[in-house]
């Protein structure tokens, strides 16, 4: 399959930035190819429970975007796909795309018969490994495209054959192989997003050892109605509801030993997650340990609102070690600098507000774009490769959408400049 | 409430004494929250807040000169290792102490210690001519220009009766390996590491210069240290003063000799379940974590037990930064937490690779009355016992 047109652009990454860039460019009349490495579109946003500050779920916005893609013949998207090679020059790029086998074809109706036949399980990547998925699974309840995926590690096993036999629609195709194809495009929007910082690197917080220490992205999954606990915020160690929760800001951020920068969104995320806890259990108490609360612009109002809730205690002081007691409670130790006292509080659950690491932090990139010392893509005017969203700097969803729209415009300029 | 006054002169003086990074601090408070003092109760724990102390220093404000505050830090390095801004907190503490000690403000309990170091070249009130008494009957080789390694024995292991066993064990091990080593003897002086940490900069300079001149005059090229404190100061602070040699801690050398087949620990020893305590100056300060563990693991039948706080997160014995001379009430000693941890893990022995740690852990073990069930040793003693 070779597509040739110099009026087309490639968008790499199907998260909120990539989706926005792709739709905006297509609706301006441009042919757009969208490449996503996961089996579904929506990226990190699809795994959020609610947006701050309005506290609405991201599903409706994503649904609208998915509909815009479905209704627009000028967008072609590929999931489980990656860019392997880029050559050429601005206005005239040759791109090689590799698509990994899904082993489930377009006949899939998501009926779930295959899943019933599956026996082995794996950590669920969508839920950051909180629960397990079968070897053939739907990435998420509302995923787009709504189609199953088969774990490649079971290819060649009896289980795979049983799964194939269980499908009434002949949608399981175990003979699929990786496919490569070439595209010709005028510009490339690089919107490959971010991943959470590896919290286990912050040794003194015990993430990975203490089961009741989780990260903020995991909290989104616990709180989500389609999450591993169907929206119940519980203690991972025993599944009991939580009454007292700590949020630890700057967990690995603004820290030379970890991420030297501020991710800008974690304060708002924790303030938002505090409302999840209190909405579920009005008797609950929340402690937020911080260096500074960074709520910029209009977000100050949201900060003030949460801060004024008597059930929320803000402690100015970076939390030290988290110790697990034999009772199962976790003790957070910190200095309360406002009151000049050392505090030790027991919690059911501790949430680490980890920052954003650009997906481009390590490894070779197929495109020649300069990166800063933290791996974020630098502005590359004139190269025809335009970074958008969190791969460029840590930003919230609204800013990602704005940045993606700007990136779409710059990409469009390359399609007409020649 | 009394007004507090900011003194730019005081701040500049502290910075001049070596607190160059004190202004980097953003007051996040991680240092205070990770400080081992948080793990024990008592007056010092309540008074000593390193974040606050640095803030006072930043502003040149009064309040840090209270002995309980100024001399509480054991320089374990937990805060420095994890400081988000890379503030050299220990250097700042040292400079703040120096700003007081330099003006004659030495706490009463430290006067005889510093006085002995001035007069005898060691802080243990031992006469200089008795520095080599521990060597009697051992036939310890003298260092000469043909000797490969100069063995520098920590003052503690020269004078403290319990600690001399470390020096003797290391000599036994080195002799068994057949390598060329020797001591200089009475002319050696304390490395000065703890003196400098106590803020006596003048004394440190005197001790360091005396050692540097002596070692260079004798033709020293390579040094084996018995203590991680001497190792650290020789590698980190002596080079800028003109003392540049190849320095190795004895555990590093023994691992090398073990790998080369020059040493073998083939004899089973009396205890099997052995917990290892990482000394701050060997671990966090010098990144030597594996060598002592590898040595222990090479002894037949030994089961190595890891304490809850180990390696990077190791809990200090409380003997660094001059704290080895501090009087601390029972129940407030960090070492007691190590003893409890080792005992809970059913260790028969708690070993370490530092004379100060051995000293502090031995005291803690006694105060908890656990000597019957838990033996405290220094690693060299264990290794010497395992020699055929």
Image: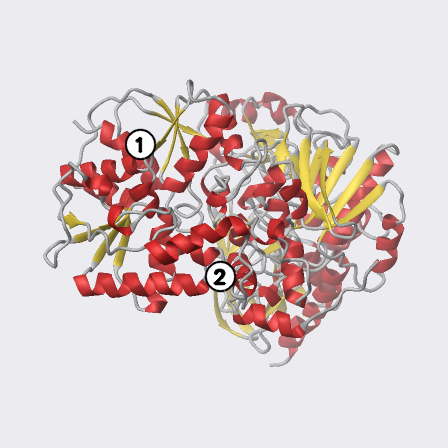
Label 2 with label 1: CB-CB less than 8 Å:
no
Residue drawn at x 70%, y 63% as measured from the top left: A21
Whether residue B168 can be seen here: yes
Q: Is residue A244 left or right of residue B288?
A: right
Residue drawn at x 54%, y 35% as measured from the top left: B333
Q: Nearer the viewer, residue B249 or A317?
A: B249
Q: Secondary structure at mark 1?
A: helix
Which residue is situated farthest in the left direction here? B146
> Against B301, is A13 above or below?
below
Q: Nearer the viewer, residue A390 or A355?
A: A355
Q: Nearer the viewer, residue B136 or A221?
A: B136
Q: CA distance from mark 2 to mark 1?
A: 45 Å
The chain identifier of the residue carrying mark 1 reads B
Q: Secondary structure at mark 2?
A: loop
Q: Quadrant of residue A111?
A: top right
From the top left corner, tell me how far across and down residue B119 is, in percent: 35, 57
In this rendering, the count of numbered labels is 2
Q: Quadrant of residue A12?
A: bottom right
Q: Quadrant of residue B350?
A: top left
Categorize mark 2 by other alpha carbons within 10 Å: few (<14), some (14-19), many (20+): some
Say which mark, if any, is on residue B296: 1
Query: Which mark lies nearer to you, 2 or 1?
Result: 1
Q: Is residue A275 left or right of residue A16?
A: right
Whether residue A375 can be seen here: no
Judging by the rendered image, the residue that carries numbered circle 2 is A365
Say which mark, if any, is on residue A324: none
């Amino acid at each position: 399959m070779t597509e040739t047109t110099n009026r087309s652009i490639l968008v790499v990454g199907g998260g909120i930035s990539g989706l926005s860039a792709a739709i905006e460019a297509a609706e301006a009349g441009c042919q757009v190819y969208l490449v996503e490495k996961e089996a579904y579109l929506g990226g990190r946003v699809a795994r959020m429970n609610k947006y701050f500050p309005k506290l609405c779920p991201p599903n409706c916005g994503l649904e609208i975007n998915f509909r815009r893609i479905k209704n627009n013949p000028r967008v072609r998207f590929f999931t489980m796909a990656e860019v392997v090679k880029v050559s050429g020059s601005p206005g005239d790029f040759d791109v090689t795309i590799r698509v990994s086998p899904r082993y489930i074809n377009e006949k899939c109706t998501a009926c779930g018969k295959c899943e019933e036949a599956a026996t082995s399980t794996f950590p669920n990547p969508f839920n950051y490994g909180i629960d397990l998925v079968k070897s053939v699974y739907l990435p998420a309840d509302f995923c787009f495209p709504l189609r199953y995926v088969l774990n490649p590690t079971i290819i060649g096993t009896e289980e795979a054959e049983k799964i194939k036999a269980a499908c009434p629609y002949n949608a399981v195709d175990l003979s699929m192989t990786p496919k490569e194809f070439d595209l010709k495009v005028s510009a490339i929007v690089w919107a490959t997003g971010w991943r959470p910082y590896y919290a286990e690197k912050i040794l003194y917080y015990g993430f990975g050892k203490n089961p009741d220490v989780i990260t903020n992205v995991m909290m989104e999954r616990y709180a989500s109605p389609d999450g591993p606990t169907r929206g119940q915020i519980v203690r991972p160690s025993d599944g009991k509801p939580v009454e007292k929760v700590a949020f630890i800001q700057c967990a690995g951020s603004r820290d030379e030993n970890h991420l030297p920068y501020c991710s800008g969104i974690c304060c708002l995320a924790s303030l938002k997650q505090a409302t999840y806890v209190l909405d579920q259990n009005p008797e609950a108490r929340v402690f937020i340990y911080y260096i500074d609360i960074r709520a910029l612009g209009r977000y100050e109002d949201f900060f003030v609102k949460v801060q004024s809730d008597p059930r929320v205690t803000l402690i100015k002081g970076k939390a030290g070690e988290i110790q697990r007691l034999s009772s199962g409670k976790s003790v957070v130790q910190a200095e309360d600098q406002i009151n000049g006292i050392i505090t030790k509080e027991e919690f059911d659950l501790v949430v680490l507000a980890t920052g954003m690491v650009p997906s481009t932090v390590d490894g070779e990139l197929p495109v020649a774009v300069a990166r800063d010392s933290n791996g974020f893509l630098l502005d590359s005017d004139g190269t025809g490769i335009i970074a958008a969203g969190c791969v460029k700097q840590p930003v919230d969803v609204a800013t990602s959408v704005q940045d993606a729209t700007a990136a779409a415009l710059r990409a469009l300029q390359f399609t007409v400049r020649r | 409430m009394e007004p507090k006054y900011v003194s730019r002169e005081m701040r500049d003086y502290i910075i001049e004494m070596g607190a160059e990074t004190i202004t980097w601090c953003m007051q996040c408070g991680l240092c205070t929250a990770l400080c081992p003092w948080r793990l024990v109760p008592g007056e010092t724990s309540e008074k000593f807040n390193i974040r606050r102390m640095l803030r006072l220093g930043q502003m040149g404000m009064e309040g840090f000169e209270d002995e309980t505050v100024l001399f509480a830090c054991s320089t374990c390095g937990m805060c420095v290792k994890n400081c988000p801004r890379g503030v050299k907190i220990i250097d700042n503490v040292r400079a703040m102490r120096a700003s007081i000690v330099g003006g004659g403000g030495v706490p009463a309990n430290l006067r005889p210690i510093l006085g002995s170091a001035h007069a005898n070249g060691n802080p243990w009130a031992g006469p200089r001519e008795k520095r080599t008494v521990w060597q009697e009957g051992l036939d310890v080789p003298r260092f000469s220009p043909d000797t490969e390694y100069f063995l520098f024995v920590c003052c503690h292991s020269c004078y403290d009766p319990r600690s001399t066993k470390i020096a003797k064990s290391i000599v036994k091990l080195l002799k068994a390996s057949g390598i060329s080593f020797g001591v200089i003897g009475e002319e050696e002086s304390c490395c000065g590491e703890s003196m400098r940490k106590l803020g006596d900069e003048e004394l440190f300079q005197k001790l360091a210069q005396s050692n540097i001149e002596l070692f260079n005059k004798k033709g020293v090229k390579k040094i084996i240290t018995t203590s991680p404190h001497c190792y650290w100061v020789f590698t980190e602070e002596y080079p800028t003063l003109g003392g540049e040699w190849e320095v190795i801690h004895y555990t590093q050398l023994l691992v090398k000799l073990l790998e080369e087949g020059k040493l073998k620990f083939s004899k089973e020893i009396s205890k099997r379940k052995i917990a290892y305590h990482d000394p701050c100056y060997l671990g966090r300060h010098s990144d030597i974590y594996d060598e002592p563990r590898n040595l222990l693991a090479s002894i037949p039948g030994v089961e190595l037990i890891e304490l809850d706080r180990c390696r990077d997160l190791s809990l200090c014995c409380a003997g660094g930064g001059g704290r080895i001379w501090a009087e601390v009430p029972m129940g407030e000693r960090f070492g007691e937490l190590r003893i409890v941890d080792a005992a809970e893990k059913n260790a028969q022995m708690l070993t370490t690779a530092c004379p100060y740690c051995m000293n502090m852990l031995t005291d803690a073990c006694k105060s908890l009355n656990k000597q019957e069930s838990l033996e405290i040793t220094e690693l060299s003693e264990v290794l010497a016992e395992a020699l055929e």
